[in-house]
Image (cartoon, rainbow, N blue to C red):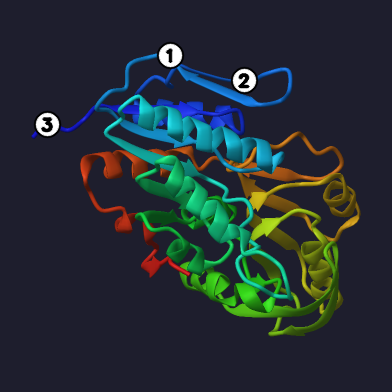
C-alpha cells in the first residue's frame, strides 16, 4: 500500500509559521483561498486537487480566536469534502483551553465544545503544543499528538550557560511542567505561591525555595496580561534573586502585558512563534521557532512513525 502524498495548508492565523513548517518538511505550502464576505462570513476554497492526500491544516486559534477557529473548522470541512484521505488539525496554540471545567455555576466547558467542533468538522487527528491542561487530550475522540516547546527553550538557555540557575514555577499549577525543566537543566526548583484577585491581577503570597544570589528561569505555558510573571519577578527579586528570565510557550501579549513587561524586573521574555507577535519596544522579547519541531512531528505522523522520541532531552523526559 502506497503512502498518500502530504500537503500542508494554512489559514490566516499564523501563515509565517505554516510557511516555515512547509519549508522544513520540504513541501510547498498548499494553495488555498481563506477570506471573508462583506458580512464577515468566512469563505474557503482549496485551489488544488487533494483527493487521497494526507492533509495538515496549520491554524492556531489565537486572537481573534473566534474568527481563526471558524477558519480552521471550514478548512477542515473543505478538505473532507475534497476527499482528503486524512486530515490533521495542527493547532500550535489551542484557544479556549482555560475553559476546561465548571469552576462556577452555569458556565460551559468550552474547551470540550471546541474539541467536539473540530472532530465534527472532519479532523482525523490533532497535533498541538503545550496544552494549558493535560486532560484536554481526553476531550477529543480522535488521536492527539501533544508536543512540548521545552526542546526549543532548553536549547536557547543552554547556550546562555547561566550559572547558579533555579527553575521557578510562577504558580502551583505549573509545578509538574517546571519540574521537567529542572530535570533537564539538572537545577533546583522553586515555586511562587499566588492568589488570583481578578482575571488580570494576582497577589503573590510566598516564594517556596532558595533563590538568593541565583539566576532564575520562570517557565509557564501561557501569558496574556503578564500579571503572574511580573508579580512573581518582583517577589523573586525581593528574595534576593540576581537575574530573572521568563520562558513562555504561548505569549498572547495584550497592550496591558506590554506595559507591565516594560516596567517589570524581568531581564527577558523568551517565547515561541506558536502565535504571531509584533515587536515590543523597551523590553527584550525573544521569539524562538517551533517550526522544525512541528515539521519533524508531521513527517513522523505522515510516515506512521513514533513521535515520543521528541520528548527526550538531556537524559530527561519532557512530558509534564
Helix, strand or loop at label 1? It is loop
Residue 174 sits in which quadrant? bottom right
The residue drawn where x is 42% and y is 44% is 293
The residue drawn where x is 56% and y is 28% is 15
Tell me the quarter of the image containing the N terminus: top left
- Residue 20 visible (yes or no): no
> Few, some or many C-alpha atoms within 10 Å of disc 3 (few <14, some 14-19, many ≥20)?
few
Residue 214 sits in which quadrant? bottom right
Q: Which mark is on residue 35?
A: 2
Q: Do the residues labelled 2 and 3 touch (CB within 8 Å)?
A: no
User: What is the CA distance from the residue labelled 3 to the residue labelled 1?
Assistant: 24 Å
| Sequence-first disc among 2 and 1 | 2
Helix, strand or loop at label 3? It is loop
**Residue 159 relative to residue 80: left or right:** right
Question: Closer to the camera, 74 or 21?
Answer: 74
Name the residue that disc number 3 marks: 2
Q: Which mark is on residue 47?
A: 1
Amino acid at each position: 500500500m502506497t503512502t498518500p502524498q502530504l500537503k500542508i495548508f494554512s489559514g490566516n492565523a499564523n501563515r509565517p509559521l505554516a510557511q516555515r513548517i512547509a519549508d522544513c518538511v520540504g513541501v510547498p505550502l498548499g494553495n488555498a483561498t481563506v477570506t471573508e464576505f462583506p458580512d464577515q462570513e468566512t469563505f474557503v476554497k482549496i485551489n488544488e486537487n487533494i483527493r487521497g492526500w494526507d492533509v495538515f491544516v496549520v491554524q492556531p486559534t489565537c486572537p481573534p480566536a473566534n474568527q481563526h477557529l471558524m477558519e480552521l473548522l471550514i478548512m477542515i470541512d473543505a478538505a473532507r469534502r475534497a476527499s482528503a484521505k486524512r486530515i490533521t488539525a495542527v493547532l500550535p496554540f489551542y484557544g479556549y483551553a482555560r475553559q476546561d471545567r465548571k469552576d462556577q455555576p452555569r458556565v460551559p466547558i468550552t474547551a470540550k465544545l471546541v474539541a467536539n467542533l473540530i472532530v465534527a468538522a472532519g479532523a482525523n487527528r490533532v497535533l498541538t503544543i503545550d496544552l494549558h491542561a493535560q486532560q484536554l487530550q481526553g476531550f477529543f475522540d480522535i488521536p492527539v499528538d501533544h508536543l512540548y516547546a521545552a526542546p526549543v527553550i532548553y536549547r536557547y538557555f543552554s547556550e546562555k550557560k547561566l550559572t547558579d540557575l533555579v527553575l521557578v514555577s510562577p504558580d502551583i499549577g505549573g509545578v509538574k511542567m517546571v519540574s521537567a525543566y529542572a530535570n533537564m537543566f539538572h537545577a533546583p526548583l522553586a515555586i511562587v505561591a499566588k492568589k488570583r484577585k481578578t482575571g488580570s491581577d494576582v497577589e503573590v503570597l510566598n516564594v517556596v525555595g532558595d533563590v538568593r544570589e541565583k539566576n532564575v528561569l520562570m517557565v509557564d505555558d501561557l501569558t496574556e496580561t503578564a500579571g503572574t510573571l511580573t508579580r512573581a519577578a518582583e517577589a523573586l527579586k525581593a528574595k534576593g534573586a540576581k537575574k530573572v528570565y521568563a520562558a513562555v510557550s504561548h505569549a498572547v501579549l495584550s497592550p496591558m502585558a506590554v506595559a507591565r513587561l516594560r516596567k517589570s524586573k524581568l531581564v527577558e521574555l523568551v517565547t515561541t512563534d506558536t502565535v504571531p507577535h509584533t515587536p515590543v519596544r523597551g523590553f527584550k522579547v525573544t521569539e524562538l521557532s517551533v517550526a522544525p519541531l512541528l515539521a519533524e512531528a508531521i513527517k513522523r505522523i505522515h510516515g506512521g512513525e513514533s513521535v515520543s522520541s521528541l520528548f527526550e532531552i538531556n537524559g530527561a523526559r519532557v512530558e509534564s
